[in-house]
Image (cartoon, rainbow, N blue to C red):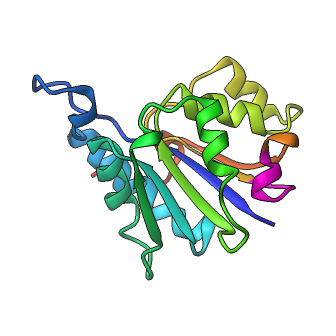
Amino acid sequence: MPMLHLLRHAKSSWKDDLADHERPLNRRGRAAARQIGRHLPSLAGGIDLVLCSSAVRTRETLDLALVGFAIRPRCLIEDGLYLADCDRLLRRLRQLSEPDRQVLLIGHNPGLHDLVLALAEPGDPRVQALAVGKFPTAARASLWLSTSWPALAGARHRLVDYVTVGALPGDQD
């Protein structure tokens, strides 16, 4: 059964007068990305594929979050994922093939938040809380998929984990 992990980029800097695409992580964001990365391998085991927006802040989140993996997964940095909405994200995920069983998607809101709500079984209390709440920076949601990638949008899937950095044990660098 495939598993999809959705990770919003960590907190970015607004200090410099940069284009949105070029904004890096701030100090707090780098610490959060490292912290979320320390806990990802224990949940996911191996990741087959990482799809990542081409924005600087998502690429930095990717690099820091994957430090704990013994084997770095295959990573695709894609311009089409930058600020992608739910429909664009679904179209991209439906193109995946069966060998990619564990996929990590690193992107932006509101697309990721909308995607979780579109895919998750609505009866789960965590999904209901997400529906009225937020999907903050460095939040991760993981779903067990009940279908193949091409049929992804035609079914609802079990949310197996939703975590924010503030809910994780460990130091705050």
Q: Quadrant of residue 119?
A: top right
Q: Is residue 48 above or below residue 133?
A: below
The quadrant the N terminus occupies is bottom right
Task: Please give the count of numbered marks on the rendered protein.
Answer: 0
Residue that sits furthest to the top in the current view: 132
Name the one closer to the observer, 169 or 66: 66
**Residue 168 located left or right of residue 45:** left
For residue 138, say whether it is visible: no
**Residue 59 located left or right of residue 98:** left
**Which residue sits at x=38%, y=56%?**
62
Q: Position of residue 64 (x, y in %)?
A: 32, 59
**Which residue sits at x=66%, y=54%?**
95
Q: Is residue 118 above or below residue 64?
A: above
Q: Position of residue 129 (x, y in %)?
A: 72, 26
Residue 91, magenta (yes or no): no
| Magenta extent | 144-152
